[in-house]
Amino acid sequence: MLLEFLTSRRLTLLHGLLAMAGLAVYVIASHARHQRRHPSAAIAWVVSLALMPYLALPLYILFGSRKVVRGAPARSTPALCLSANPSSALAPRFQHLAAAMGLPHAVSCRQLAVHQDGREALDALRSVIQGAGSTLDVCTFLLGRDTLGREVIDLLVRQSRAGVTVRLLIDGIGVYLGGRPDLKPLSAAGVRVALFVSPFRSPLPGRTNLRNHRKMVIADGQRMWSGGRNLAAEYFVGDLACTPQKMPWIDLSFDLQGDLARQAQQRFDLDWAFATQARRPAPPLAEFAPPAEADGAQLVASGPDQAEDTLYSLLISSCFTARSRILVVTPYFVPDATLLMALTLAARRGVAVDLVLPRQSNHRLADMARPAALRDMSAAGAHVWLAEAMIHAKAVVIDGELALAGSANLDERSLFLNYELMIAFFKPADVQRFARWIEQQRAAATPYQAHAPRALQEFGEGLIRWLAFQL
């Protein structure tokens, strides 16, 4: 009896010590790295560390970190941020807030082409890769082990052998999701390949859960191809050889020229230095020239390498100040309470809010987590549209004055955990190109019909949102 009592006391003491150690690690890491979290995520970690420290502490060390930079003081807003589009009420506010959070200011963007389908996107991708004369930088979440992936590898090999300096950056998890393509021909041809935080060899604790979801192909720092497409067949025209029965997804990408491409190359340089643990490149000495009136675009990087939740803050601000129209297309819609409130309040005050989603996405958990948000949107007067095809596009258009397009979904993983890249367009003609593209998808979709949930269903939705999207 005495032995059992002593053993029990030791176990209780050990549990208490582990719980206190776990909570101490949480508090110290959150303070040192400015790990601001959604309240429900913070509660989940604290409760888990207190009740199950032996399980929660290793998980927190592996997955708990949300930022890899310290908080930076707000900087003064350059005058050009307020003059890029003086006729617009929305653009100056957006640029002012972006500059205050440390994002690069708006620069020139020329010859924007929004790809209407996968064939146009593939032709543009080939053109940008084959047109590189000195440098070619490719960043993707995944590279498919399929016909498209093999073609991209062949194109990169060809360019490297022609004397172009080629770098390929693939996410450390995405490389497995793409089927682990054969990268040996790239290395043999002199292409430099890096995995962004490999989960099995990473020396960076606390960063395993932070994935690089950015997509960009930059040639000579002058041309840029970007958007929501990964470099795999289903994002373009499908793969008749491997999966002839699988229809290609509907996605959105674009290419452009101008100083924005050079800015994107600097963003790539920073990501490359982080992934390879090389010395970070020095900031450019020369500033970019201000864009012509109403002709600017702005690089919006979001993620652990930004001290602020940049994209999230810009979306919230833009939704609260929208006057007439908000157009959204996204494959996964699992917003947090604040973003959902911004959208529903916009709808309630008379802003026309249209949200286009796939009826069934490729992520079952995301589909199971979204109904509560869709019901709230519908009840507020927003129009939700469900497409029969899988839509993987990510774009937001507000008041015909601002278009955001790129890699970020409207879910909590993209907004709070992933490294994402969006581009804000301010030129009216450019904004209208994205608005028309979303309108085409809306016209082919059917209206969402809200149904009152059963109690068990509502509980399950909340549980999925809490567990799957808060880590």
Image (cartoon, rainbow, N blue to C red):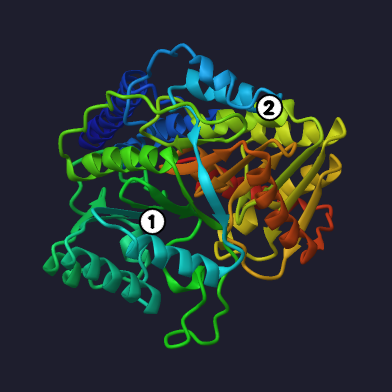
Dot 1 or dot 2: first in sequence order is 2
* 10 Å crowding of disc 2: few (<14), some (14-19), many (20+): many
Pick the residue in front: 109 or 118.
109
Residue at 56%, 33% in the rendered image: 312
Q: Can residue 199 be spotted in the picture?
A: no
Q: What's the residue type where badge 2 is placed? A: Leu
- Vertical order, 264 against 102 (above or below): below
Please tell me whether mark 1 sits on a helix, a strand or a loop: loop
Q: Position of residue 303 (x, y in %)?
A: 42, 36
Q: Quadrant of the C terminus?
A: top left
Where residue 141 is drawn, which disc sits there?
A: 1
* 10 Å crowding of disc 1: few (<14), some (14-19), many (20+): many
Residue at 33%, 21% in the rendered image: 70
Name which quarter of the figure residue 271 lies in: top left
Residue 307 horizontal side relative to residue 460, left or right: left
Pick the residue in front: 74 or 368.
74
Q: Position of residue 57 (x, y in %)?
A: 31, 36
Q: Residue furthest front?
A: 292
- Vertical order, 372 against 42 (above or below): below
Pick the residue in front: 264 or 415.
264
Q: Can residue 296 be spotted in the picture?
A: yes
Q: CA distance from mark 1 to mark 2?
A: 31 Å
Name which quarter of the figure residue 241 lies in: bottom left
Q: Which residue position is annotated with label 2?
A: 90
Q: Position of residue 115 (x, y in %)?
A: 57, 61
Please tell me whether mark 2 sits on a helix, a strand or a loop: helix
Question: Would you say the residues marked 1 and 2 are in contact, meaning their CB atoms lie under 8 Å apart?
Answer: no
Where residue 244 is drawn, which disc sits there?
A: none
Q: What's the residue type where badge 1 is placed? A: Phe
